[in-house]
Image (cartoon, rainbow, N blue to C red):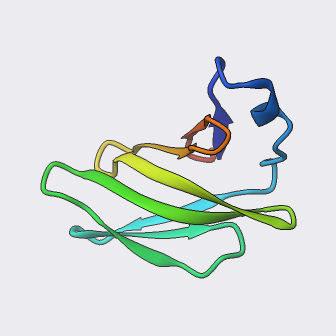
Amino acid sequence: MPILATDAPLLCRQADVSKLLFAFADSGSDLSVKAGEADPFLVPVSADGSIAKTIAVPIGRKTFTVDLTGNAKGRDLQVYNRDYACLFKLEPVP
């Protein structure tokens, strides 16, 4: 579940990400990622667990380009949209 950073610009707060879920599956050297209704894709995972990949994320009728970064092993992941300076931490759904 994406959680908006508290210091994010006002425009970021208007993004309705309430229905956007990320599904992750770790296979060791790759992280399978599914963002919303988009097709799943693989992100390479380095030996220390870090990942970094630019991906497209569907939100409503639009698709936004974001950087998916963090550590897959530590489940510490975030997405950042450079165009709007929006940072979302990805929290596991309980």
Name the side, left or right, on which 46 lies relative to 71: left
Question: Residue 49 location in percent, x, y?
Answer: 23, 51
The residue lying at 40 percent from left, 48 percent from top is: 69
Residue 1 or residue 66, whichever sits in front? 66
Quadrant where the C terminus sits is top right
In the image, residue 15 sits, relative to residue 29, either above or below, namely above
| Residue 48 sits above or below residue 29 on the image | above
What is the count of numbered marks? Answer: 0
Q: Residue furthest top?
A: 7
x then y, percent, for residue 73: 28, 49
The percent coordinates of residue 74 (x first, y second) are 31, 42
The residue depicted at 31 percent of the width and 54 percent of the height is: 51
Query: Residue 75 in the image: x percent, y percent?
Result: 39, 45
Quarter assignment of residue 21: bottom right
- What's the residue at 72%, 74% (across, down)? 37
Q: In the image as oriented, which residue stretches furthest toward the front?
A: 83
**Looking at this rendering, what residue extends furthest in the bottom direction?**
39
Taking 3 as reference, is 69 left or right?
left
User: Is 17 situated left or right of 41 in this image?
Assistant: right
